[in-house]
Every structure is written in C-alpha cells, then in structure tokens.
Image (cartoon, grey):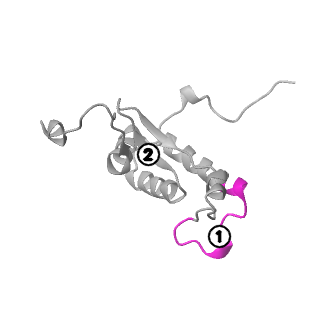
C-alpha cells in the first residue's frame, strides 16, 4: 500500500496573492495567542510558536482569541495547538510583501550584545 499525502512539500509551497488585510489579521491573531515575530541580528526572520505547557508552567490560562465568548475558548492544549497550526499555515503562504509588512510592523529585532547599536546608522 502506498502512502499518499494531501500536503504539498514545503519546498514547493505556492505563495498566495498579496492581501495585506489577511496577513495583518492572521498576524494579530497569532500574537494574541502568544506567538512572536523576531528578526535576528543577521536579518533572519523567525516565528515563535507558543506551547500550552508554557502557560501551565506560568500558572496562566491559555490565551483566547480577541473578543472570544466563553464557548469560543480553547477546551484543551490540542485545540490551542490546532489554532496556532492553522495560523502558521496562513502566515507561511502569504506573499513575500505581506510577510515583509508583518515583520516590519511588529517584528522584534535582535541585537548582538557585544555590538553597540546606534539608530543613526540606520538613517544613512
């Protein structure tokens, strides 16, 4: 029996057409669930996926989507992971311009501690 997968290989993933509204909504939902967007000191961009155990360790409840009613909350860690996974799916398929917009707007920039940072260098 052969294994078939409905998922396309990561290297052959097609980008969706530009839609900054969708990208902004997905990014907002992702961050409201505890996800992060980070730009490393080398310019590499990363998304940080939250894990339910982190909130348990901190003694906090799982985050809820903005404006969610009590019956719309996550019942367990698996539902929470599923929501994060769906948002990752959307974010990874947004166009390069939309991803640039997300990281430029809300990405946290990592600075190497041994290198001095002067914002005036960025203005040149």
Q: Please state if 107 lies on the left or on the right of 115 as rendered.
A: right
Q: Nearer the viewer, mark 1 or mark 2?
A: 2
Q: How far apart are the two marked residues, 1 and 2, measured between alpha carbons?
A: 25 Å
As for residue 69 lying within the magenta part, the answer is: yes
Toward which corner of the image does residue 12 lie, by quadrant?
top right
In the displayed structure, 114 sits above or below 59; it is above
Residue that lies at the very extreme toward the right in this rendered image: 1
Residue named by callout 1: 72
The residue that appears at 62% across and 52% down in the rendered structure is 54
Q: Secondary structure at mark 2?
A: strand
Q: Quadrant of the N terminus?
A: top right
Q: Residue 23's spot in the image, x, y percent?
A: 43, 51
Residue named by callout 2: 37
Q: Residues within 10 Å of mark 1 (few under 14, many from 20)?
A: few
| Earlier residue among tags 1 and 2 | 2
Q: Residues within 10 Å of mark 2 (few under 14, many from 20)?
A: many
As for residue 120 lying within the magenta part, the answer is: no
Residue 11 numbered mark, or none:
none
Range covered by the magenta-colored residues: 65-80
């Amino acid at each position: 029996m052969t294994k078939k997968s409905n998922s396309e290989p990561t290297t052959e993933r097609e980008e969706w057409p530009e839609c900054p509204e969708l990208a902004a909504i997905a990014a907002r939902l992702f961050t409201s669930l505890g996800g992060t967007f980070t730009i490393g000191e080398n310019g590499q961009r990363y998304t940080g996926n939250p894990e339910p155990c982190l909130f348990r360790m901190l003694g906090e409840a799982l985050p809820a989507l903005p404006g969610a009613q009590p019956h719309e909350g996550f019942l367990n860690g698996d539902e929470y992971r599923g929501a994060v996974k769906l948002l990752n799916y959307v974010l990874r398929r947004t166009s390069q311009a939309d991803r640039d917009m997300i990281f430029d707007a809300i990405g946290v920039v990592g600075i190497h501690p041994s290198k001095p940072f002067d914002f005036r260098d960025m203005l040149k």
